[in-house]
Structure formats: structure tokens, C-alpha cells
Image (cartoon, rainbow, N blue to C red):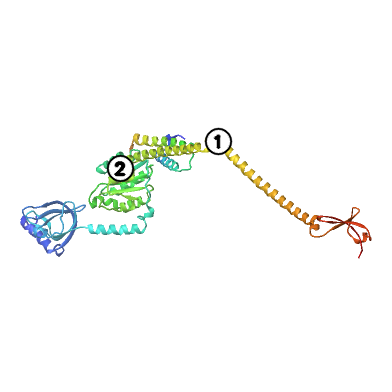
Amino acid sequence: MPPVVSVTQLNLYIKSLLEGDGKLAYISIRGEISNFKEHFASGHLYFTLKDGTSALKCVMFRGNASKLKFIPNEGMQVICSGRVSVYERDGAYQLYAEDMVPDGEGDLLSALQKLKDKLEKEGLFSAETKKALPKFPLKVGVITSETGAAVKDIFSVLSRRYSLCDIVFCPATVQGETAPVSLYSALDVMEQTDADVVIIGRGGGSIEDLWCFNDEKLVRRIARFSKPIISAVGHETDFTLCDFVCDLRAPTPSAAAELAVPNSEELYYDVISLRNHLEKRLSFIVSAKQNDIEKLSKSRIFTNAQEYICEKRSLSVDYVADKIDNALGKIILNKEKNLCAKIASLDALSPTKTLLRGYASVTADGHNISSIKTLSVNDNITVRFHDGEAECSVKNIK
Amino acid sequence: MSENKLTFEQAYEKLEKIAEKLNSNDISLDESIKLYEEGIKLSDYCTEALKKAKQKIETLKNGN
């Protein structure tokens, strides 16, 4: 039998072993807070740090706790720094935490940013890849949790706003480690349906709750998705990679449903106003045609057809008659002028005029004598003057 | 052409086109009346469709 010692001696021995190890004098431990208790009177914090397989009791005394820059709570991932020693009274070793910081939120976020940059460079978020939503979808696809408010909200908005469309619902897990694969499968199933627009999302939650919508495989699957898809993850201020890769982002699941379908009430009024427009236009066209007919029927051609036609005709006749008159007048005038001219020249040649000018005409035995050759001395000639005749006898011929 | 086979979208777009055609001043009375009658039928079809719509919900669970 080994030497017998007391419990106190053993605990002390173990304590000295632990405190003698320099590594345990100040060490940083990563784990999840559980069984968190803040002791009201003393202000000390008592909790357990655990990971997948082990747990460690911890205490943080008020002095250190008061210096914390954040509020630790159950389930949080943290890194605690302090010394490991033995609490002899309970025979337990524990961490005497001097400092605590949230673990990995910073790391997680920077890794997310790197992934976002990478995917953005590959063009997964580019505007060119965004598909337009159909104006009048026949079927809306919904991918979200079967439980929770999101699915109820979406269905309620779709039913109230546009019952002309049907719904196909592919439920999926929307948080935790199994979520990305579940969402991926739901997308595969949805791809095979005849939905013409899809909503994927969930209600509000913490960063961890929404984290599955940052999953790279899931995001790439959405980029390959053939139907227009609306992202509705969390609240207004939450952003996940799903929001960037989808064709449209909605601030809430209800808002997504409003974006996916038109408003039946508005459509109804649009149809009524189109119908009213048709009636207005038809009545305008009919009365325009009626006006045309009235105008025509009032025209003189119809009311005084005979008079109108005859008036036109008689005007023509008058016009032609005038023209004939004018033409005839001109012709007569011309002929008169001609005649006068001829009379004048005739006149000028008249023998009477010649006699008046002082010439005399000579005749013998009634014959005209125009040359002295036909005359002999003692011939009897008649000399005719304009105002009479003289009987003469030729005395001499020169 | 049976209007019963048209989707709401098709009927609505046809109605819009007819309203546009009737805006023209170049249209004969016969044509106007024909278009008007067709338009009224389409508007009735649309309002009926909106009133009588029955939304069906189908749930497809994946084997996950």
C-alpha cells in the first residue's frame, strides 16, 4: 500500500504541481461559455468553458470582470487568459481568468470579407448576371424554414396580394451546420419545378444564426440557379453573401413577397380604367364620324343640288358666251378696219379725185383719148372737167 | 380565338394594345367597334380572373 495522505495534502500537492508549471501561470484558452453565473453580491463571474469534447471550470473575480469591454453570455465563443490552479476546497482545478475577449468574431468577419472579395472578383455579384423578375408570375417558389414567422409572413402576403399565382414550397433548415446543405438541396429541388420566381431566406437572428447564408458552396449554387431569385435573410440591416449573389435583395421575407408579385387591387383598377378608356375613345370616334356626316349633309351639294349644279352649268355657259361675243366683236372690228382701208385706197385711186386735183379727161366719139397720137388737127374732142364738159377742136398738135 | 386559354398576362397585354390602337385617329368605324368589343371581353376576362383566383400551395420536401 502506498503512503497514506490526507485529502488536503493531496490537493495541496496537485496545486503545487500546477503552480510550478510555468505554462499554466498565464495561458489563453478558447472555448464556449456555458453555465454562466454572475454572483450578485460579490460581482464575481462563474462559468464553464467548453469545446466539443471537454469542459473547464472558470472564475473571474470582480476586479477583472469590471474591466471587460463586452458583456459575456451563455453560448458565446471567447478566449480567456489567466492562470490554472486548484481550488482546494472542491478539489477541482480551474482557470482564474484575468482577461476575456470574444473569439473569432473578428476572425470570422475578416475571413468573410476575403471570401466576398474573391467571389466579387469572379463576377458572381455583378449586375450583368442579375435576372429580371417576371411581371405576372404564375408560380412563386419559397425556400425557408417550415417553422417560424418567415414562411407564414410570405404566404400571407402572397395570398393577400396576388392569389393569381400558385406557390411551391421547399422547406429547409435555415441555421446551424446542416443548413447550407439543406438549402443547397432545396435549391436543387426548386430548380426542377416550374416556379418562375423564387424567394430564399429566413427571419431575423444573430450573426451566427444567419451565418449559413455566407456558405461558399451555397452562394455558388445560387449563382448557378436558373430562375430569378430574391434574397430575404434576416432584417433590414443584416447582410449575407446570399444577398449579394441573388438577383434582388429584400429587407424582410414579407418585403420579398411584395417584390415577387404585383398587387391584384392595383391591377383591378388598371383594368377598369383601361375599359373606361375604351368606352371614351369609342364614343369620341362615333361622334367624330357623326359630325363628319352632318357637315357633309349640310353642304349645298345636297341641300340645293339642282340649283347648285345648274348654277355651275349656267356660269359656264355665260362664260363661254362672253368669250364668243368678245371673239366675234374682235373679228368684226378687224373686218371693218380692213374695209375702211380698202375704201380709202380705192378712193385715192378714184378718177373723180383726180379731176378735182385739176386734171381733165379727154374723150372723142365716146372713146377715151389718152395719147396725142390718136388725135389729128380739127378733130372734135370733149374735155371733161370735174364740174362739166367743154366741146373743143384740136388746133395744133405738138 | 378562345379567351379562356389566355393567361392573365396575355389578356392584360392584349387589352393594353387595343387601348393604344383606339387612340389613333386614323381608324375606321367598323374597326373601332370590333376593337372595342374585343377589349370589353378582355377586360371582363381579367377582372373575373382577379376575383376568382384560387392560390394553390404545394410543398416539396427534399430527402435531406
Report the residue at 39% width, 35% height from top. B44
**Mark 1 Cα within 10 Å, few/some/many (few <14, many 20+)?**
few
* Quadrant hosting residue A198: top left
**Are discs 1 and 2 less than 8 Å apart at CB?**
no
Residue B24 screen position, x and y as percent: 45, 43
Residue A173 seen from this side: no
Query: Is residue A160 shown to the viewer in this render?
Result: yes
> Residue placed at 33% from the left, 48% from the top?
A230
For the C terminus of chain A, the quadrant is: bottom right
- Residue B32 left/right relative to A383: left
User: Residue A238's spot in the image, x, y percent?
Assistant: 25, 52
Quadrant of residue A319 in the image?
top right
- Amino acid under disc 1: Ala
Residue mark closest to the camera, 1 vs 2:
1
- Dot label at residue A305: 1
Query: Which residue occupies the foreground of this view, A370 or A211?
Result: A370
Are both tags, 1 and 2, on one chain? yes
Q: Is residue A217 above or below residue A313?
A: below
Residue A171 is labelled as 2
